[in-house]
Image (cartoon, rainbow, N blue to C red):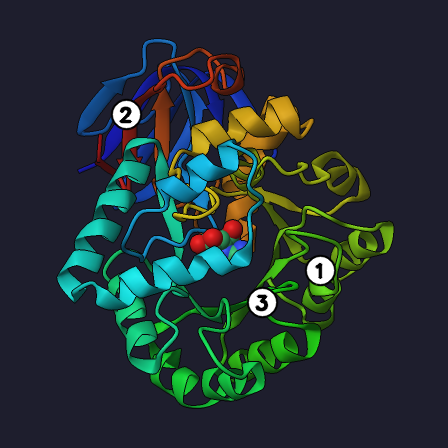
């Protein structure tokens, strides 16, 4: 049934006129069918009175690692006491994930996706990468397939044991054969302690040959080749991007690679924040994501990410909101979401606030009044 959300104080559509005041939106058949001035909407079956609240597109979280078991709060506590983050911590989660049943993995991933939905995330990407055997990566992607349509194979997360090149052979061969039908994209952790440039290139090209989109965990822990490799391969996104040279920034811009920034990873590991301002000013499309994972960023909250991006990354509230919606959609190459133009998927969030500025102004406060996903009230 059609639904009109009326008396919206501030409506963010990212249309030609990106922000409307005193507005309404009509959704039908799971799509946005009309936006315009409040009180002028065509009549619809149901009416939701926004009573002056702000309506924004549902958040698009383009980078999460939701399929895992175990707990690393002790590792986090040790970091608070001064220990550094190291990629090797991933193996702790790999052991717990391998030991977990399919049902346990699914119920944990579903619980996290539901938590994300309650905070306004209506589109979510989910990576594998804590299985690292053919069987456990397939199981992880099967779980992801029950949670989302955006599923990324991250077999090249870390070398589980033994020889790195032999493991890369496994990832590009039998593992990819098994998981390619389940995945929509491929990713590799290009970093010292994980995989080098040549190894990542092999993995990502093998995925591209199967028609998968490419994401790269790039330049997270230090400077390196990840961002430039993403540009060379025409990747959809380079993610993290904490340590970028000016050449890296130009390469991302010229190749139209989206920089997916994940500031809670930096918050939780006490690392420097990514150069968001430099990226935006250079003309790179920026996305914001949670990176939800048990090691570096155990949050599903896009409102918190937006608040951090304003406070620590130097983005304005509208830039941060754009990155958390339209930017995420660009990273996932999904034109249907991240905006509320006519024809968009009817994914929207009614905030208990008069404007999106409140996402940063009231950090840590649950401002989500309603979530509408595919035209249905989900919260
Ligand atoms: O995005 N960088 C690699 N992967 C995750 C961390 C994984 C972990 O520590 O479990 C990240 O930060
Ligand atoms: Fe990540």
SS of the residue under disc 3: loop
Quarter of the figure with the C terminus: top left
The location of residue 253, given as percent across then percent down, is 76, 54
The residue that disc 2 covers is 370
- Write the residue at 77% across / 50% down: 244
The location of residue 152, given as percent across then percent down, is 43, 65
Give the camera-side residue of 249 and 73: 73
Q: In the shown orientation, is residue 297 left or right of residue 349?
A: right
Mark 3 C-beta to ligand 1 under 8 Å:
yes
Q: Which mark is residue 227?
A: 1
Figure quadrant of residue 45 = top left
Between the C-alphas of marks 2 and 1, the distance is: 37 Å
Q: In the shown orientation, is residue 247 left or right of residue 335?
A: right
Mark 2 or 1, nearer chain start? 1
Is residue 171 placed above or below 108 in the rendered structure?
below
- Write the residue at 61% across / 24% down: 310
Mark 3 or 1, nearer chain start? 3
- Write the residue at 55% across / 47% down: 85
Is residue 203 placed above or below 229 in the rendered structure?
below
Figure quadrant of residue 375 = top left
Disc 2 or disc 1, which is closer to the eye?
1
**In contact (CB < 8 Å): disc 3 and disc 2:** no
**In contact (CB < 8 Å): disc 2 and disc 1:** no
Give the camera-side residue of 65 and 303: 65
The location of residue 306, given as percent across then percent down, is 52, 29
Disc 3 or disc 2, which is closer to the eye?
3
The residue that disc 3 covers is 194
């Amino acid at each position: 049934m059609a639904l009109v959300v009326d008396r919206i104080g501030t409506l963010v559509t990212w249309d030609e006129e990106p922000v409307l005041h005193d507005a309404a939106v009509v959704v039908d058949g799971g799509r946005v069918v009309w936006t315009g001035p409040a009180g002028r909407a065509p009549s619809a079956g149901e009416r939701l009175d926004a009573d002056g609240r702000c309506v924004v597109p549902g958040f698009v979280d383009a980078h999460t690692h939701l399929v895992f078991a175990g707990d690393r709060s002790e590792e986090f506590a040790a970091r608070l006491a001064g220990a550094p983050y190291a990629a090797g911590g991933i193996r702790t989660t790999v052991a717990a994930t391998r030991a977990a049943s399919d049902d346990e993995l699914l119920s944990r991933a579903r619980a996290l996706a539901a938590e994300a939905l309650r905070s306004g995330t209506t589109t979510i990407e989910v990576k594998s990468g804590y299985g690292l055997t053919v069987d456990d990566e397939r199981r992880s992607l099967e779980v992801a397939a029950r949670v989302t349509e955006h599923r990324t194979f991250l077999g090249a997360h870390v070398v589980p044991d033994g020889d790195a090149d032999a493991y890369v052979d496994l990832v590009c061969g039998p593992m990819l054969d098994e998981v390619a039908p389940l995945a929509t994209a491929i990713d590799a952790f290009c970093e010292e302690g994980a995989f080098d440039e040549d190894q990542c290139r092999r993995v990502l090209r093998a995925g591209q040959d199967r028609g998968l989109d490419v994401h790269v965990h790039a330049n997270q822990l230090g400077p390196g080749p990840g961002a430039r490799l993403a540009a060379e391969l025409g990747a959809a996104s380079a993610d993290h991007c904490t340590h970028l040279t000016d050449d890296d920034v130009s390469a991302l811009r010229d190749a139209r690679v989206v920089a997916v920034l994940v500031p809670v990873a930096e918050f939780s590991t006490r690392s420097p924040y990514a150069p968001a301002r430099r990226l935006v000013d250079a003309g790179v499309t920026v996305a914001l994501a949670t990176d939800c994972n048990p090691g570096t960023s155990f949050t599903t909250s896009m409102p918190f990410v937006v608040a951090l991006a304003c406070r620590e990354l130097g983005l304005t509230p509208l830039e941060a909101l754009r990155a958390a919606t339209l930017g995420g959609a660009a990273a996932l190459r999904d034109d249907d979401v991240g905006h509320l133009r006519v024809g968009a998927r009817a994914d929207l969030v009614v905030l208990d606030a008069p404007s999106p500025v409140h996402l940063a102004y009231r950090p840590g406060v649950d401002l989500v009044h309603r979530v509408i996903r595919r035209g249905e009230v989900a919260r």
